[in-house]
Image (cartoon, rainbow, N blue to C red):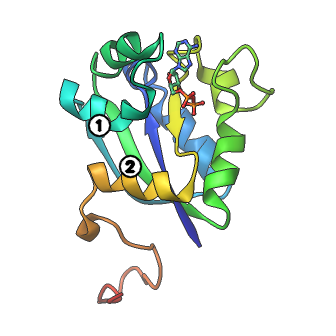
Amino acid sequence: MEQTFALIKPRAFHENLTGPILNLFNTAGFKIGAIKSWWLSDREARQLYGIHQGKPFYEDLLTYMISGPIVVMVLEKDHAVADLRKLVGNTDPQKAEAGTVRKLFGLNARQNAVHASDSPENAEKESALFFAQMEKYEPRGISFGKVHRKEES
Ligand code: ADP
């Protein structure tokens, strides 16, 4: 089971697209390992997107990403990183394949509904920005209605 990191961007969250986007993730076989909403500060947005510093779209991207709350999550599945990138689609929704999240819910190259990590290393780094180790768990071994303990890992 691999973990990846995903983020629902401000416009998609504001337009109440969180439910439909999570539904696509679930239908594609992803399990939610951790989730919460967050409002990025300027400093946090620079940490998340620092790799793009100097690119022509960088400052506008930061302004957009701090414009309202987002939803951040850890998703789990075999081949989670590659499979989520495929499901999310091209950066530019106009170039994204039919059925992808960005084709369905993206507006333009900046306001493209979601972010998904592009490698297992970045997934680890990005999820560590938002989630403490104790906030993440694998949804395994839970039997509802019975007393149970979380497995130690
Ligand atoms: P992706 O999110 O598909 O991995 P990048 O890592 O290249 O794409 O870019 C990060 C984010 O920066 C994009 O999701 C998008 O919000 C923004 N971005 C990228 N390219 C452009 C562009 N040409 N114009 C405006 N915003 C852009």
Hey, which quadrant is residue 23 in on the image? top right
Total marks in image: 2
Q: In this image, 53 relative to 81: left or right? A: left
User: On the rendered image, what quadrant is the C terminus found in?
Assistant: bottom left
Considering only vertical position in the picture, is 66 above or below 45?
A: above
Residue 47 got which mark?
1
Q: Residues within 10 Å of mark 2 (few under 14, many from 20)?
A: many
The image position of residue 146, as x and y in percent, is 35, 88
Q: Residue at x 80, y 26 (%)?
A: 98
Residue 87: image location, x then y, percent: 69, 41
Quadrant into which the N terminus falls: bottom right
Q: Quadrant of ligand 1?
A: top right
Residues at marks 2 and 1 touching, judged by CB atoms closer than 8 Å: no
Which residue position is annotated with label 2?
126
Q: Position of residue 53 (x, y in %)?
A: 39, 24
**Residue 45 locus on image (x, y percent):** 29, 30
Which kind of residue does numbered mark 1 sit on?
Gln
Helix, strand or loop for disc 1: helix
